[in-house]
Amino acid sequence: MIGLVLAAGAGRRLRPHTDHVPKTLLPVAGEVTILDIALRNLAAAGLTDVVVVVGYAAGAIADRAAELERCHGVALELVHNDRAEEWNNAYSLWLAREHFGSGVLMVNGDTVHPASVERAVLGARKPDLAADLILAVDTVKKLADEEMKVVADGRGLLARITKKMDPAEAYGEYIGVSLIEPAAAIALADALEATWRRDPNLYYEDGFQELADRGGAVVLKPIGEVEWVEVDNHVDLSRAREIAGRC
């Protein structure tokens, strides 16, 4: 099992902070960045081989790679997305497909949350659980229009994942942490490719939906009452800086 961080996004809504660095390198606790927290969490979960998908301002991450490895006791491999400023993240995740067969614990490179989330997702793996993916879901937070919402079917598996849903219909919010089982490697890669080829502006969550629609088993794992935030704008960044010191 390896770690994977999606960190290719430009973070345009966070300018001027992201004029020269990707938002994953924005500091949230002194010099500690969002990426530091992601790597720290993966290492705390026992995952020290980490792939980072980079794109916008990729050189800024490459320049810090050795320091990040020393600080967090991880070995990094950078996968470059040369379309990161044109296409959405379904393509970014697909670019890391050769690593899926190792089993992957993936985190979005723009979320701040405690390591308990990674532990919860890893702990959801059971010998008798036929899962292709396991998604971390916040079932406590009050939802609005912007969140990536999920609906469970009668078996407790993913039926629908989308932002375009009445919040009242949702089971909870997917928070950007997921586990890809090795056995799902080929099926997920195929689903992601079908997704970005259909529309390169789609999210990787649309690829998860494609996998579920093809019969894949996508388990939803509630994370309990946890402080976390996805950093999309300046308000989110302020919230991240409140949370980071407590992670």
Image (tube, grey):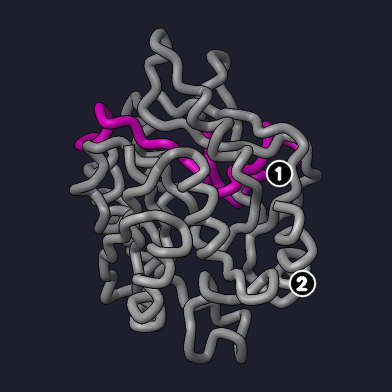
Q: List the single residue furthest toward the top.
A: 128
Residue designated by label 1 = 166
Disc 2 residue type (three-letter): Ser
Residue designated by label 2 = 238
Q: Is residue 177 magenta?
A: yes
Task: Find residue 110 and report its horizontal and vertical position in percent.
Answer: 55, 63
Q: Is residue 17 magenta?
A: no
- The magenta segment is 159-187
Is residue 231 depicted above or below 108 in this figure? below
Q: Quadrant of residue 33?
A: bottom right
Picture quarter with the N terminus: top left
Answer few, some or many: residues within 10 Å of disc 1's Cα (few below 14, many 20 plus, some between 14 and 19): few
Is residue 211 depicted above or below 39 in this figure? above
Q: Quadrant of residue 51?
A: bottom left
Relative side of 139 to 123, left or right:
right
Q: Which labelled disc corresponds to residue 220? A: none
Foreground of the two, 107 or 32: 32
